[in-house]
Structures are given as structure tokens and as C-alpha cells.
Amino acid sequence: VEGARNRLADLEARLGGDALGLLASWRALGRRIEALHREVVPLADAAGASALQQYRAGTVDLSTVLDAQDDAWRARLQLAGLVTDLTAGRTRLALMLGEEWYR
């Protein structure tokens, strides 16, 4: 952990205004990914599973199940998109700074 803090302090010292903005966006994106991964996707998956159980019990129709499962897949797709954006941001930072900063 101390090594990561030292690398981050070194990074911040080397960054200019544009790169600092990119770093702030990158961190915010990481927080969004964490929230989706820990909260939204599991809740969407649980809603899909619940809808399927209700369908099997005869209390909801198939369209309810399909809507719930579609929501779960959309949450996963959103998560994948954000991870892609995070990776692209990391690449932009690495190009700005040289690759040695994150090792």
C-alpha cells in the first residue's frame, strides 16, 4: 500500500493540468465501476432471478421475466463499457507519463 501511495504522489507531482483532470475523471470512473459491480449488477441479477421464480409460480407473465433479465444484462453491459473507458483512460495516462509510473 505504501508503494502505491508513493507512486501516486510521484504521479501527481509530474502531472500538468490536463493530466490532473484526466486522473480525476479516471478516479471517478473507478468509483462508478465499484458501485455498479458491488450494488447495481447484483441487485439486477437478483431481480431477474426473482422474476423467474415468480414466473415458475405463475404469479407473473414471461414479459416480466424478460424485462428483468434485460435489465440485468444492461447493467452488465454498462459495467463492461465503464471498464473499457477506465482502461482507455489508463492508457492515455501511461502515454502522457511513460509506462514506468504504475509498476
Image (cartoon, rainbow, N blue to C red):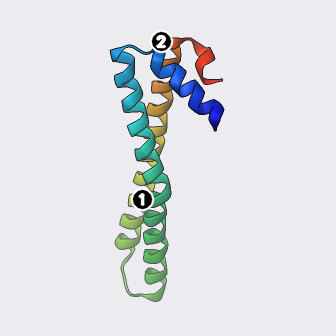
Q: Which one is nearer the viewer's eye here, 76 or 95?
A: 95
The residue that appears at 33% across and 16% down in the rendered structure is 17
Q: Is residue 91 visible?
A: no
Looking at the image, residue 103 sits to the left or right of residue 48; the answer is: right
Residue at mark 2 to residue at mark 1: CA–CA distance: 33 Å
Question: Residue 68 lies in what quarter of the image?
Answer: bottom left
Q: Is residue 70 above or below residue 78?
A: below
The residue lying at 39 percent from left, 74 percent from top is 62
Residue 96, x across and y down, in percent: 47, 12
- CB contact under 8 Å: marks 2 and 1: no
For badge 2, the amino acid type reads Met
User: Mark 2 = which residue?
Assistant: 96
Closer to the camera in the image, 7 or 81: 7
Quadrant in the picture for residue 39: bottom left
Which type of secondary structure does the marked residue at label 2 adopt?
A: helix
Q: Is residue 10 visible?
A: yes
The percent coordinates of residue 83 (x first, y second) are 49, 38
- Identify the residue shown where x is 41% and y is 71%: 65
Relative depth, front residue between 70 and 89: 89
**Residue kind at label 1, given as amino acid type:** Val
Dot 1 corresponds to which residue?
40
